[in-house]
Image (cartoon, rainbow, N blue to C red):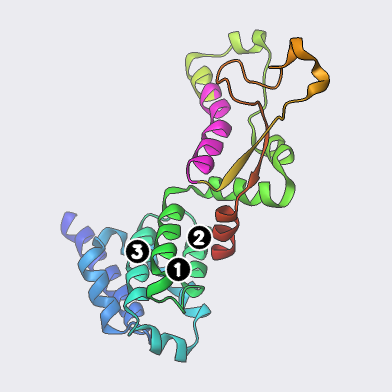
């Protein structure tokens, strides 16, 4: 049985290496890259990525890109990310990013590579929330993605497993926001000092826990805009 499974993996790997070899800009070079850096059991994950990329690049572009060391560097990163892609949407993001990097050169290689690394660190849900903040604003996005709340009475009725799942889902919104903020893709909009509060309430705009002005919401940053424009 093990031999049969190994043979199946080898056949599938050969098939996708053949598909990769048929792509003009890569040819044998892509097959060699795949053989070197991609474990056989993950070869099948890059098929749709290669298909989408091939569809977005014409023959002349593909022919010139095989001599662009900066594009090849990003392409190798894209292959590695594709092996970890859990959705077809992620493969589309990767293909769009690379197709929009066809004019990459020494001057913009570093910024593109860093942006590509940020994409690698985001989940599809992170990207979706960033897109929704851009298109619908913070509060509509929060209402759309945050887990529904339940009463204290209903919470006490939950089993240990249900309680765990509820707590996890309830914390996901903050987790997504923290991730987007950590990569400077969103900017906190903080409450300003309002002198109408009067001197006795001068610190009314401050958060008791952090000592910083309270956060009223979030907006997408220039970097967040650049990331979305790179993959959509």
User: Where are the magenta residues, as a range?
Assistant: 166-183
Could you tell me which secondary element the residue under label 2 belongs to? helix
What residue sits right under mark 1 in the picture?
48
Q: Is residue 182 left or right of residue 149?
A: left
Q: CA distance from mark 3 to mark 2?
A: 17 Å
- Taking the spot 20% from the left edge, 60% from the top edge, the residue there is 6
- Taking the spot 46% from the left edge, 54% from the top edge, the residue there is 119
Callout in the foreground (3, 2): 3
Q: Is residue 59 above or below residue 57?
A: below
Question: x and y percent of residue 44 in the render?
Answer: 35, 64
Decide: marks 1, 2 in contact (CB < 8 A)? yes
Magenta span: chief secondary structure:
helix
Q: Is residue 123 above or below residue 14?
A: above
Q: CA distance from mark 3 to mark 1?
A: 16 Å
Question: x and y percent of residue 110 in the render?
Answer: 38, 64
Decide: marks 3, 1 in contact (CB < 8 A)? no
Task: Determine which quarter of the picture holds residue 19.
Answer: bottom left
Could you tell me which secondary element the residue under label 3 belongs to? helix
Question: x and y percent of residue 172 in the render?
Answer: 54, 32
* Foreground pick, 211 / 174: 211
What residue sits right under mark 2 in the picture?
88
* Foreground pick, 105 / 150: 105
Label 3 crowd bin: few (<14), some (14–19), many (20+), radius 10 Å: some
- Taking the spot 68% from the left edge, 51% from the top edge, the residue there is 134
Q: Which image quarter holds the C terminus?
A: bottom right
Could you tell me which secondary element the residue under label 1 belongs to? helix
Question: x and y percent of residue 78 in the render?
Answer: 38, 65
What residue sits right under mark 3 in the picture?
77
Examine the structure image and report whether residue 174 is included in the region drawn in magenta. yes
């Amino acid at each position: 049985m093990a031999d049969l499974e190994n043979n199946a993996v080898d056949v599938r790997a050969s098939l996708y290496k053949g598909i990769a070899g048929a792509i003009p800009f890569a040819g044998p070079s892509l097959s060699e890259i795949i053989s070197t850096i991609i474990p056989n059991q993950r070869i099948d994950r890059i098929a749709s990525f290669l298909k989408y990329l091939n569809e977005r690049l014409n023959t002349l572009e593909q022919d010139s890109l095989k001599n662009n060391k900066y594009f090849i560097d990003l392409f190798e990163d894209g292959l590695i990310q594709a092996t970890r892609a859990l959705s077809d949407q992620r493969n589309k993001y990767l293909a769009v990013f690379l197709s929009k990097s066809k004019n990459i050169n020494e001057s913009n290689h570093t910024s593109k590579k860093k942006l590509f690394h940020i994409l690698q660190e985001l989940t599809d849900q992170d990207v979706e929330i960033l897109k929704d903040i851009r298109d619908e604003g913070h509060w509509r996005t929060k209402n759309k993605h945050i887990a529904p709340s339940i009463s204290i009475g209903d919470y006490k009725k939950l089993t240990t497993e249900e309680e765990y799942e509820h707590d996890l889902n309830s914390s996901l919104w903050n987790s997504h926001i923290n991730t987007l903020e950590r990569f400077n893709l969103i900017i906190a909009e903080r409450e300003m000092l309002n002198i109408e509060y009067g001197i006795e309430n001068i610190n009314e705009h401050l958060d008791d826990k952090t000592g910083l002005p309270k956060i009223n919401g979030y907006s997408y940053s220039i970097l967040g805009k650049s990331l979305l424009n790179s993959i959509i």
